[in-house]
Image: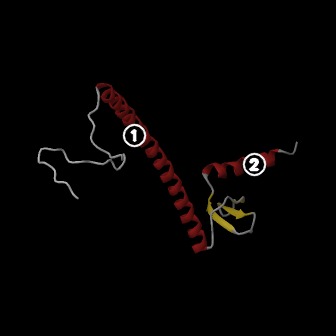
Amino acid sequence: MVSKKKADEAPETVSLGLATRTLPVKLTGDELLEKGARLAQIEDDVTSEKARQLDHKETMKARLAALEAERSAVASSLRRGIEYRDVKVDQLADYELGKVREVRTDTGEVSFTRLLTDEERQRKLFADSQAHEAPA
């Protein structure tokens, strides 16, 4: 039979076991100091990490810019079928025409023609006068 309980009696309870719950707990003075020190350390770490990432970002941007410049140069060479390189040229003075021709040593083509400078013309005059005085 089920017994009737009186209103002033505490209800009967049975433990179902212990459990863990995350609940608010007031921090002690020592815990507050410890949290404050940890926060200061985290602030320093955040500042350092931001600086490191900014430096790394600048390095990555520079690397990307270099790759893009190289890509552009290679694409331009492919498009035109040429690229600029250092080529030896023979500078040939033609004193009768008063010009200098630059002849490529790799293909024999005239790559550039210009007028003789005043200094280059003077060398010819001195060379001629020395050639006439040479027989002794």
Would residue 30 be found to the left or right of residue 124 on screen?
A: left
Q: Is residue 16 above or below residue 75?
A: above
Residue 104 point in image, percent of width and height:
71, 64
Taking the view exactly as shown, the residue that stands out farthest to the right is 136
* Residue at point 36%, 36% (across, down): 43
Query: Badge 2 local density, few (<14 within 10 Å), some, or many (20+)?
Result: few
- Real-space Cα separation, disc 1 to disc 2, in angstroms: 77 Å
The residue under label 2 is which amino acid type?
Answer: Ala
Quarter holding the C terminus is: top right
Name the element at disc 2: helix
Residue 21 point in image, percent of width and height:
33, 46
Query: Badge 1 local density, few (<14 within 10 Å), some, or many (20+)?
Result: few
Would residue 21 be found to the left or right of residue 89 on screen?
A: left
74 and 5: which is toward the camera: 5
Q: Is residue 56 above or below residue 70?
A: above
117 and 84: which is toward the camera: 84
* Residue at point 81%, 44% (across, down): 133
Mark 1 sits on what residue?
46
Mark 2 sits on what residue?
127
Disc 1 and disc 2 in contact, CB within 8 angstroms: no
* Residue at point 39%, 40% (across, down): 46
The residue under label 1 is which amino acid type?
Answer: Val
Q: Quadrant of residue 49?
A: top left
